[in-house]
Amino acid sequence: MNPSVSSRYTRIGIDRIIRLKWLEQTAYLALAGQKAPAIKTILQKELQPEFPGSNSNVRGSLNKTITILMRVWVRPSEEFSCLQQDGLELIATLPREYHIIVHWGMIMAVYPFWSTVASYVGRLLELQGRVVARQIQRRMREHYGERETVSRAVQRVLRSFIDWGVLKETSSKGVYTQGMSQDIKSLKLIAWLVEAFLHAQPEKKSVLRAILNATSLFPFHLSLVSGDQLAGVFERLQVVRHDLDQDLIMLGRVS
């Protein structure tokens, strides 16, 4: 694996609260045909009121947030170009309530840290029906190292989950429960989300059954599909059949 690519899976990358409405706005600007410099200028103007103050820390936080938004929907690396274009097409055609699925898939593909936090959150929800922030913090420090930056980034991703409505706060500080959940029946949307999931995996492959039940996709329930069905939607998805009921899905050419 290319070292620059593999480093995506060991670095944090995303350490800001990313509100769903900001990603939606960025995607719409991209769909409108705005060029990257214009999109950045518009986002700086539109998001400024949510980053009050004029000191350098505030400006730095705003610019870092915009950098993340741009990397997701405006300036993806080459390996995500097809995924991004198909994702924008889905946003243009799907009802608005399904856009969260596309934003979730794209941000987890570009920033595997988001996917890793989500996987631990989903696992705790399955095991105990609630999420305790300190448990997530401990798991993530074990995964990424005992660094204060890891703790801060986890806290901000969890706050993002709350903003997106996929987690709900409880009366106990740092304890959350499941928020919204959505059924996904569209074959094209499932195929796209499977591809996004694979981009978040270092090996870029997984058993289909494991993908459909992945805890990193905890806000969604994917309908049962076959590997052949997925490969029929996007040729970038390749299928290797292990036995009659187990397909291995992997990424082929991505551009």
Image (cartoon, rainbow, N blue to C red):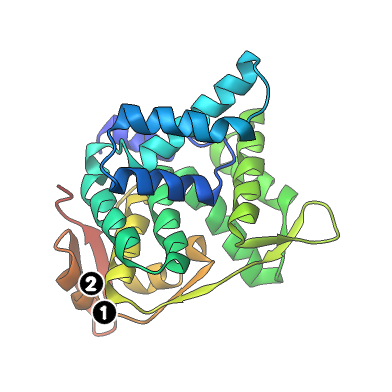
Measuring from the top left, give residue 195's x and y in whole percent: 29, 59
Disc 2 crowd, CA 10 A, few/some/many (<14, 14-19, 20+): many
Q: Amino acid at mark 1?
A: Ser
Q: Position of residue 100 (x, y in %)?
A: 47, 60
Residue at horizontal 50 percent and vertical 73 percent from the top = 182
- Relative to the observer, which residue lies in front, 234 or 130? 234
Secondary-structure class at tag 1: loop
Asked whether residue 11 appears in the rendered view, the answer is: no
Residue at coordinates 18% horizontally, 70% vertically from top-left?
Answer: 233
Q: Quadrant of the N terminus?
A: top left
Q: In which quadrant of the rendered view does residue 152 lie? A: top right
Which residue bears the numbered disc 1?
Answer: 226
For the point 36% across and 82% down, the residue is 224
- In the rendered image, which residue does mark 2 sit on? 230
Amino acid type of the residue tagged 2 in the rendering: Leu
* Quarter occupied by residue 169: bottom right
SS category of the residue bearing label 2:
helix
Relative depth, front residue between 86 and 120: 86
